[in-house]
Amino acid sequence: MEPEEVLNTASSTSNYANTRKMNRKEILETKRAINQIIKSASAVKDHLSLFPSFRSYSRNGLSLCLETERGDKLTSHLKKCIQALLKENMEGPYGSEWPTEEKVKRKEMVSPDARYIFVHSANTNEMLDRNAPIIGFVHYRFTMEEEMPVLYVYELQIERCIQGKGIGKFLMQLIELIAKKVQCSSPVLQFFQYQLLMHFLSFLLNLFLELHMVKNVLIFPFQLHGKYFLSKHGICWLMICNFNHCRAA
C-alpha cells in the first residue's frame, strides 16, 4: 500500500471513530434530557393545580369533583374503589384470565410511579367528598416510548351509568394538557388482547368522536398471541380514519 493510501485509510478510520463517539455522546445526552423531563413531570405533586378549572365538572346533569393522588399514597378506601371499578368494567372482557390480570393490576395500582386523577360525585355544596365512592379514574405514568418522553395512560375507567356524558372527553383533554405542560410528546394509549379490542372499540370510537379538541394521542399496536394484530398505521387508520385530529404513532 502506498504511503498516501495509508494516510487516507488512517484518516477515514479516525473520522469514523470520532463520528461513532459523537453519536454515542448525543444518544446519552438525549436520554439524560428525556429522563430529566420524566423526573420533573413525576415530581409535580398535584397536576390538577396546573389547571384549576378542571377540578370540577358540571355538565349533562353531572356534578363532579376531581382530585389527584400517587399510587404509593392510596388510602384503603381508594384501593377498594379502584378494584371495584376495575372488576365491574374489566372482568367481562378478560373472562377466565381476569383473576391473573387482577393481580397484575393490583400490583400496578400501588406503584410509586403511578399517578391518578379520581372522579367523585360532588356533595350538595359542590365540594369534594373524599369518603364518597369514586365513579371514574385515570391511572397514568411518565415514561419513555419510541425514544420520546410520554404520558402513558394505563387505565381510563368510568362507571357505566355516567358513560356517554362527556367525562371521558374531559379527562382526555386534561391528560393532553398535562402532557404538554410537562413537555411530554403525547399521551399514549395501548391495548393488547383481541377480546379487549372488541370490548373497547365501541367505547374508544365514541370517545374519539368527542375529542374535537384533543390533537395528539398516540395509539400503539394491538398485540395478539405475540404478533401484531394490525400495524401501527393500520390501527391508527382504524381509529382515526374520520378523526383527523389524532396523530399516528
Image (spheres, helix red, strand yellow):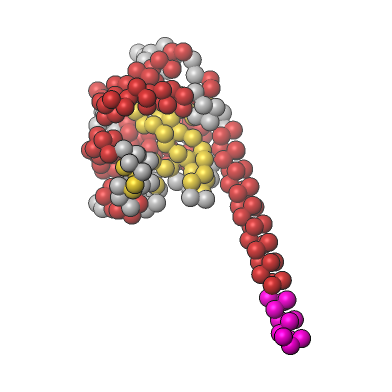
At a point 32% along the width and 25% down the height, the residue shown is 98
The percent position of residue 241, horizontal first and vertical second, equals 26, 53
| Residue 218 in picture, x, y percent from top left | 39, 47
Residue 229 on image: x %, y %: 30, 47
- Point out residue 2 in the picture as x, y percentages from the top left corner: 74, 88
Quadrant for the N terminus in the image: bottom right
Q: Residue furthest front?
A: 1
Along the horizontal axis of the image, is 116 left or right of 27? left
Q: Residue at x 51, y 32 (%)?
A: 47
Chain part drawn in magenta: 1-12
- The answer to whether any part of residue 64 appears in the image is no
57 sits left or right of 142 in the view = left
Q: Residue at x 26, y 26 (%)?
A: 95
Of 3 and 190, the residue lying toward us: 3
Question: Left or right of 18: which side holds 43?
Answer: left
Quadrant assignment, res 156 = top left
Q: Main secondary structure of the magenta part?
A: helix
Residue 135 lies within the magenta run: no
- Horizontal relation, residue 16 to residue 136: left or right: right
The image quadrant of residue 187 is top left
Q: How many marks?
A: 0
Which residue appears at 72% of the width and 71% of the height?
14
> Could one spot residue 50 in this view of the protein?
yes
User: Toward the viewer: 109 or 239?
Assistant: 109
